[in-house]
Amino acid sequence: MKFTAARTSVFGSFCVGLAVVTGFEMPVVHLLAHGASWLVHVVIAAVNVWTWVWLYRERRAMLAAAHVVDEAGLHIALGRRWRGLIEWSKIAAVARVTDGRSTKGKGTIRVTPLEAPNVEIVATEVVTLRGSYGIERRGDRVLLYVDDPDGLVQSLRRR
């Protein structure tokens, strides 16, 4: 079963908003740098275009990714930021988070787009997930944000 995070997340609105702000900011920066060489203007334009490309790719990756529950366990996939597997043997407990409990602390991995987590998974032993830039994060508590938290909790409890 697949569980996405992009449908109800504000991440898409954040990307669009940042792209619009960048679009308005670009002419202002060019005006401020009016006395600079043509190379400075090319660099400014390139940085702005790359920002739009990066935002587009992040948004598309977020829409395409999903956490998947299968016979191996829970495969974590959140955009281009998070990847990993929590095997069935390592899942001790799963709960719906509604009370805003602490999302920080040693041993906690927070896998969310921008929102507060709505699912908590407690592991029997340390799990390893790959975060941004391939950096591995280890913890025995994983906090997720998904569009259908009740469905994910039920799916994980059935195993």
Image (cartoon, grey):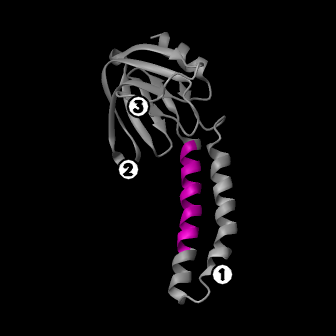
Q: Give the range drawn in magenta.
A: 46-62
Residue at figure coordinates x 32%, y 27% from the top left: 127
Q: How crowded is mark 2: few (under 14 residues within 10 Å), some or many (20 or more)?
A: few
* Residue at which label 3 appears: 109
Amino acid type, mark 3: Ile
Magenta highlight: main SS: helix
Q: Which of 146 and 24 is in front in this view?
A: 24
Does residue 1 lie above or below 64 as drawn? Answer: above
Of tags 1 and 3, the one toward the viewer is 1
Give the left or right position of residue 159, taking residue 135 as reference: right
The magenta stretch spans residue 60: yes
Of tags 2 and 1, the one toward the viewer is 1
Placement of the C terminus among the 4 image quadrants: top left
Residue at figure coordinates x 48%, y 21% from the top left: 120
Give me the C-alpha separation between circle 1 and circle 3.
43 Å
The reply to whether callout 3 and callout 2 are in contact (CB within 8 Å) is: no
Give the left or right position of residue 14, taking residue 154 as reference: right
Q: For residue 96, which quarter of the picture?
A: top right
Give the left or right position of residue 93, taking residue 3 as reference: left
Amino acid type, mark 2: Tyr
Name of the residue lying farthest toward the top: 158
* Residue at which label 1 appears: 31
Q: Which mark is residue 133?
A: 2
Q: Which of 80 and 35 is in front in this view?
A: 35
Give me the C-alpha separation between circle 3 and circle 2.
16 Å
Element on which disc 3 rests: strand
Sequence-earlier tag: 3 or 2: 3
